Amino acid sequence: MHSEFIKFPVNNDEILGMQQGNFQKSGFIRVIGAIDCTHVKIESYGGDDSELYRNRKSIFSINVQVIANSKLEIIDFVARWPGSAHDSTIFNHSTIKARFEAGQFGNALLLGDAGYPNLPYLMTPLQNPVTHAENLYNESQIRTRSMVERCFGTWKRSFPVLSIGTRFKTVQRTLAVIGATAVLHNILRHTLDVEDFDPNLYNAIIQEQGNEFLHNDERRYLIDHYFQNI
């Protein structure tokens, strides 16, 4: 059921279409989605593993990793880790990371906050931007990355159980509800949100940049060869 409504783009046309939409909303090239984690409050399940679910705010929770697009749709999510798990730990053990490492998405990029490592396909903000280009990069990165934060907001407003908290006695029932609400969220977004963008604008910019694939320091490359020229 999840795979029918929560889909990560796989072929070139799907990837390009998502990059075009994300660019039109915020001006960052080649972005396929923004990644972050959010905590779903639970009651303690008890037992020997109960403390694993206590997060850094001393609240019992499930830590859910989500990748969202400019339409605020969930295009990938991982909902199985206890609240004590760090965001980067979840990412390091995720299937989506392995797929990016294998080069399945070409030169497509993810955006994440400073809690994630800066990788050839995962762009994080600069801690101390100095130049005009570096500040432009940070502004665009943060503005584009906000789509995952806005996704969390709309998801939790539509389904308050995600923020108020669940009272299920087993983790399996909790995870089933999280998955079901993610599917329903995407159905709502597909119904309410319609992309309105000019693909020719994005295509012209990409042609100027060439078809370079990922560099060892892609963040630096983008700053020097794209944001420097804006």
Image (cartoon, rainbow, N blue to C red):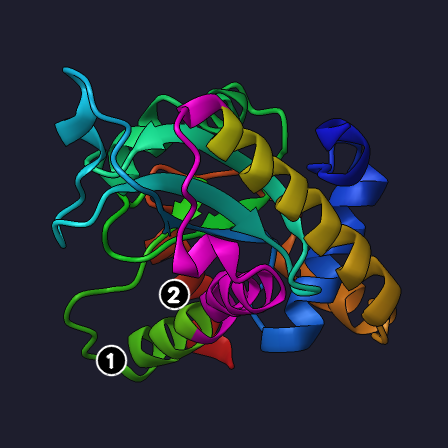
Q: Is residue 61 magenta?
A: no
* Residue 225 in picture, x, y percent from top left: 46, 63
Q: Which residue is mark 2?
A: 223
- The reply to whether residue 214 is visible in this rendering is yes
Q: Which residue is mark 1?
A: 131
Q: Is residue 82 above or below residue 198?
A: above
Q: Which mark is residue 213?
A: none
Q: Nearer the viewer, residue 60 or 117?
A: 60
The residue range painted magenta reads 143-172
Image quadrant in which the N terminus is located: top right
Q: Residue at x 63, y 57 (%)?
A: 69
Q: Is residue 66 above or below residue 130?
A: above
Magenta-drawn stretch, dominant element (helix, strand or loop): helix
- The reply to whether residue 119 is visible in this rendering is no
Mark 2 vs mark 1: which is more N-terminal? 1
| Distance between the alpha carbons at the discs numbered 2 and 1 | 10 Å
- Looking at the rendered structure, the number of numbered marks drawn on it comes to 2
* Residue 22 in picture, x, y percent from top left: 66, 64
**Which residue is outermost to the top?**
48
